[in-house]
Amino acid sequence: MTTPILEVRDLHVRVEDKDILKGVNLVLPPGEVHAIMGRNGSGKSTLSYVLAGKEDYEITGGDILLDGESILEMEPDERAAAGLFLAFQYPVEVPGVATMTFLKAAINAQRKARGEAEVTTPEFMRLVKDAGSRLNIDSAMLKRPLNVGFSGGEKKRAEILQMELLQPKLCVMDETDSGLDIDALQVVANGVNSMRSSERSMLVITHYQRLLNHIVPDVVHVFSDGKVVESGDKSLALELEAKGYAAYEKDVA
Amino acid sequence: MRQTMPVRLSTAEETLIEQLKSLGNEAEAERISVAGLPTRRVESYHYTDLKTLLKAMPPLAAPANEASAPALRVPGAYQLMIANGAVQSAGTAPAGVIVETSEGTSLSTRDDVLVHLNGAMAKQSLNLTLEGTVDCPLQIDRRIEGAAAHSASSARVFVADNAKATIIETCSGSKAAHVGNHASYVSLGKNATLTHITVDLSAEEATHFSTTEYELAEGSKLRSLVIHAGADLARSQVFARFAGEGAHADFTGLNMVDDGQHRDITLDVHHAVPNTTSKETFKQIARGRSKAVFQGRIVVARDAQKVDGKMMMQGLMLSDEAQILSKPELEIYADDVVCGHGSTCGHIDEVSMFYLMSRGIPKAEAQVMLVRGFLEELIEPIEGDELREALNGVIEGWLQGGIQ
């Protein structure tokens, strides 16, 4: 059997004495795109932060395996170098740090961690130019401080640009569709779709079915009260949209 | 009725008095004997109690025999050196630069102990007259060499009408517990433009005092940057006076303070005439058990209408034991002015740290990136790639000195 890219085993997470995740199980085989749908407050974003290694979360049980290895003891930068990427719901504005400088530092830090040679400046410029043109990102935007003064759409496109440049094994996208108009959604979805490959898996976390028309998932999981309550194929998303989340929450109760 | 109590003098004060007497300055010796060095009861020294902080006073400096390696050398800059208070001969000056010396200090008679002491001690002043556009930056390299010494130095800069120049002053020297007292008087002529940077890179056990006075004529433009990156105890004073309408100045500073250190930047800006503008931007970074002090005052004279002054202090604490103190003051006597001040203080933003780390950037590197980002607005406006690079090198050196 092929090792899954991501395996979450009975994950329990607590924040300030409150249980948020209550036994999450997920298996993402290579090449598959899974969607997690759930209402606000169901713990979707917590799951994405815990995967990326944010502090302030107490893991009270279970494990997270990336490529068969537990990542629970790893710092966020080590997880990134191991191939995990989180596209943030709210990308952070970092004043004084030019986007280009940041991109190069990120690429080189990951290469260094993997024992690879640093990217040369011409190679870096070419990579950024290629990926940027597909995402409608011009060089003026890249000279600005990271995410500072970017519109909602620009921030999300910049996240996908980072994802393209870093070429992760696992892409976790947290509400990537929020704050996007239809045209921007199309651009972002095209970017994501162009990255689908047999060696890469994606976890798309979303509130609405809309995004899944553009990024068609192999599996849809319904998330409620800190765990997966139902899994199915892409038709589950449509069913969910029609019936609402409440129908699935009753099942739990 | 005020009761006069005899002041109990510290060893440092007693030595200082002897030194002043040996220089034949009975008046200064008397002043210190009666009042002592300023304590926290003196408002302008409230956060920097010299009587307590100045533990020892080394002997008066003898002429320097050798020079240590330069702490910072800006490539392409015209180099001038003052060692143990004496102006060293320099090579051929670039076009538009006249180098002269004169006896005594360059400062005015402002009632401040550091100004008084510089006046009592400085034997020689380096005088620069700058005309036209001076192409290369000028570096005034002030040193205190040899065994621990109490040394004063002085420089006077006249930027002629319509002239344009960049000056960087550095203070450094041998690794000893020196007490340096440096003075600069900088006057900008009509429509003159000057960038004036002062970087303290004194030895770790040294004490660094510096006073810079600015006088701005009509239409002149000044960018001033003070960087503290050396000395156990440091205080840099910047006193500026707007004397002509249409003048503008950016007063900026970076106070970097490490474990066990106390560093103070004190600014006093006097808008004496109407239609003058100033922007004050100061940043303080403190780590370990340290104290960073910024005092900033903007005074607007009664008839100085249409003055615009904006003062901002931002502090970044890299440890829980660090102290960052900030005292902004506005003293406004005119009624049609725009003046404001703000002060913030905090730790490195954890959300930003997580964001950078989630992209694979290790913690230490992410911290340096965020600090550099925090300081960018001080360095970015400086003209000249090599100069900016040299300043970034100073910051980098400090940051690498203590990443947690």
Image (cartoon, rainbow, N blue to C red):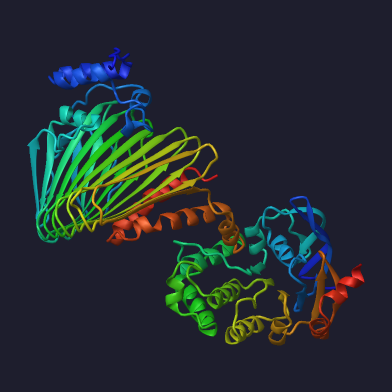
Q: Say left or right for B151 vs A37.
A: left
Q: Is residue B111 above or below residue A127?
A: above
Q: Say left or right for A138 vs A35.
A: left
Q: How far across and how far down the image is residue B403, in percent? A: 52, 46
Residue at left offset 30%, top offset 13%:
B5
Q: Is residue B177 above or below residue B91?
A: above
Q: How far across and how far down the image is residue B75, in percent? A: 26, 55
Q: Is residue A165 above or below residue B261?
A: below
Q: Which of the pair A13/B64 is nearer the observer?
A: A13
Q: Quadrant of residue A79?
A: bottom right
Can residue B99 be seen at all in this image of the molecule?
A: yes
Q: How far across and how far down the image is residue A14, in percent? A: 77, 54
Counting the numbered discs, the total is 0
Q: How far across and how far down the image is residue B198, in percent? A: 27, 46
Q: Quadrant of residue A161?
A: bottom right
Quarter the N terminus of chain A occupies: bottom right
Quarter the C terminus of chain A occupies: bottom right
Q: Which of the pair B259/A88 is nearer the observer?
A: A88
Can residue A117 be seen at all in this image of the molecule?
A: no
Q: Quadrant of residue B55?
A: top left
